[in-house]
Image (cartoon, rainbow, N blue to C red):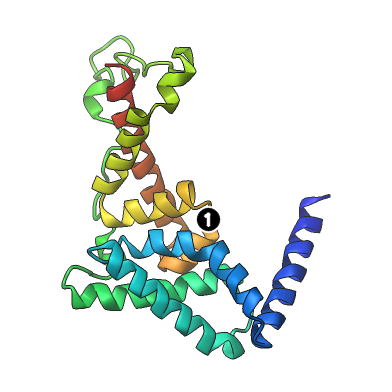
Amino acid sequence: MTEAGLQDRAATEEAELLARLRAGDERAFETLVARHYPTMLSVARHYVKSRAVAEEVVQEAWLGVLNGLDRFEARSSLRTWILRILVNKAKTRGAREARSVPFASLAPRGEEPAVEPERFRGPDDPFPGHWRAYPGNWQRLPDEALTERETLAVVIATIEQLPVPQRLVITMRDIQGCGPEEVCEVLDVSEGNQRVLLHRARSKVRRALERHLDG
């Protein structure tokens, strides 16, 4: 099936699901919860202090979804609309915990190098701008090294230490599988800002993996 055909099929299935939801079909709601709850919980945790509070935020968001179904105009996907409701609820709860500020204000003010400048040759070198030492080729490592728990722990720990905007973007893009347009709409950031945040987040995770895998 072509990409256009898949998109049409997804749109049809979503329209049918929405109709069932508006008719009060409990199984349709259970399907929706099962499909989106993990992503919602993951996003909510970036705004509040604990998993317990994040779970409360998700429950509040589902109430908002149920109350707003009749007003949903399908200008975006159902998932995008649900995540926007969630983010608004999470921001409100986070503000009460005195740890949340507007997402846009957390974006980097100046340019931050994705890779340390000292890893490149200087202007007086015969090959200025080239790597001093190329990153290790991870494909040469045994498969076990890339899948071991320690490696996964490094990735998770690095993501958790990222600035909130970078952490949210890389979580939604690389862990939850959201597309760039959806991330921009849910988090209310420009395409360029989303791209920069994702690039910086991925670069920091890569650096951490290099240090871990290359010893």
Q: Nearer the viewer, residue 124 or 12?
A: 12
Instruction: State the residue at coordinates (36%, 56%).
Output: 168
Instruction: Report crowding for label 1: few under 14, some 14 to 19, many 20 or more residues within 10 A (C-alpha).
Output: some
Q: Nearer the viewer, residue 2 or 124?
A: 2
- Asked which quadrant contains residue 122, the reply is top left
Q: Is residue 47 visible?
A: no
* Direction front: furthest residue: 27
Quadrant housing the C terminus: top left
- Asked which quadrant contains residue 136, the reply is top left
Q: Nearer the viewer, residue 162 or 212?
A: 212
For residue 130, above or below residue 207: above
Q: Position of residue 8 (x, y in %)?
A: 78, 64
Which residue in the structure is indicated by mark 1? 178
- Asked which quadrant contains residue 60, the reply is bottom left
Residue 26 is left or right of residue 139, and the answer is right
For residue 46, above or below residue 155: below
Instruction: State the residue at coordinates (21%, 23%).
Output: 118
Q: Position of residue 124 (x, y in %)?
A: 23, 14
Residue 144 is left or right of residue 168, and the answer is right
Query: Callout 1, which amino acid?
Result: Cys
Q: Nearer the viewer, residue 166 or 54?
A: 54
Residue 101 is left or right of residue 145, and the answer is left
Q: Position of residue 123 (x, y in %)?
A: 25, 19
